[in-house]
């Protein structure tokens, strides 16, 4: 995020908030996890593939008896997912879409339009609206022990307000965005880690001009 807590600006192109060394660390973090999760807003804005980029890291996963890439998860209350999104067409571990209410049927109808040759994608009812508890229970049943949540702001808020997050890794870019309408890292919510119950800082360091802060939240301790 930027110094003023923004994860993008309002321009048409994605704002670059980090550097190659930090991206390489995130790739390593992805390779250590079992699944990766984003919200439908990120799917629409960035059309991410959510892959492990490094061939060496993919080979390491294969040597461990794992898929080269992570299971991908998308959270959408309304179910309006783009079946042509790159997330659904890439990787070797498939995808799960978590929705609720009428969104479940809409998401299934959208994904039914995908070519059958693509990696599998499944829609799961996680409540209306979807809850972190239901999402984590389903992922655990699939063998997921370590989940990487990559955003955006609504999803950060949902998970961080749930009290079920073990660790928060922040990379802070050395600049301000300064736009009132720019997407924020989190939205207003009742977070369990307020002034009376702060997170525990376990690491702070620089990667070039980017500050990396790592906090323990206590959920997994």
Image (cartoon, helix red, strand yellow):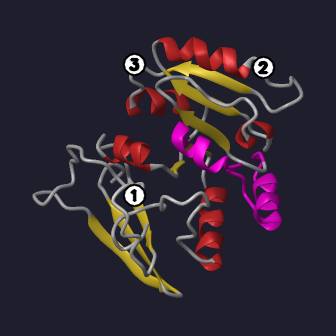
**Lateral position of residue 161 relative to residue 207, left or right:** left
Which circle marks residue 128 in the picture?
3
Residue tagged 1:
167
Provide the residue span drawn in magenta: 38-67
- When the figure is inspected, residue 147 is found, relative to residue 214, above or below; the finding is above
- When the figure is inspected, residue 87 is found, relative to residue 81, above or below; the finding is below
- Nearer the observer: mark 2 or 3; the answer is 2
Decide which of tag 2 and tag 1 comes sooner along the chain: 2
Residue tagged 2:
113
**Is 44 a magenta residue?**
yes
Q: CA distance from mark 2 to mark 3?
A: 24 Å
Q: Quadrant of the N terminus?
A: bottom left
The answer to which image quadrant residue 169 occupies is: bottom left
Decide which of tag 2 and tag 3 comes sooner along the chain: 2
What residue sits 75% from the left and 47% below the top?
A: 66
Decide which of tag 1 and tag 3 comes sooner along the chain: 3
What residue sits 38% from the left and 79% below the top?
A: 204
């Amino acid at each position: 995020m930027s110094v003023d807590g923004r994860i993008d600006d309002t321009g048409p192109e994605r704002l670059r908030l980090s550097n190659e060394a930090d991206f390489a660390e995130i790739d390593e973090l992805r390779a250590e996890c079992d699944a990766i999760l984003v919200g439908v807003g990120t799917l629409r804005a960035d059309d991410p593939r959510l892959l492990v980029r490094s061939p060496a890291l993919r080979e390491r996963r294969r040597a461990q008896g794992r898929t080269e890439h992570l299971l991908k998860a998308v959270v959408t209350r309304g179910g309006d997912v783009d079946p042509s999104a790159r997330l659904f067409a890439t990787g070797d571990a498939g995808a799960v879409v978590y929705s609720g209410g009428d969104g479940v049927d809409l998401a299934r109808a959208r994904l039914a339009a995908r070519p059958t040759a693509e990696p599998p994608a499944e829609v799961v009812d996680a409540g209306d609206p979807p809850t972190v508890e239901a999402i984590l229970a389903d992922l655990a049943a699939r063998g997921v022990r370590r989940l990487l949540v990559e955003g955006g702001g609504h999803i950060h808020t949902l998970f961080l307000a749930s009290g079920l997050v073990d660790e928060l890794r922040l990379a802070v870019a050395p600049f301000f965005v300064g736009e009132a309408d720019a997407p924020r890292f989190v939205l207003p919510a009742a977070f369990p880690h307020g002034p009376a119950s702060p997170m525990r800082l376990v690491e702070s360091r620089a990667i070039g001009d980017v500050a990396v802060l790592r906090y323990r939240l206590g959920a997994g301790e």
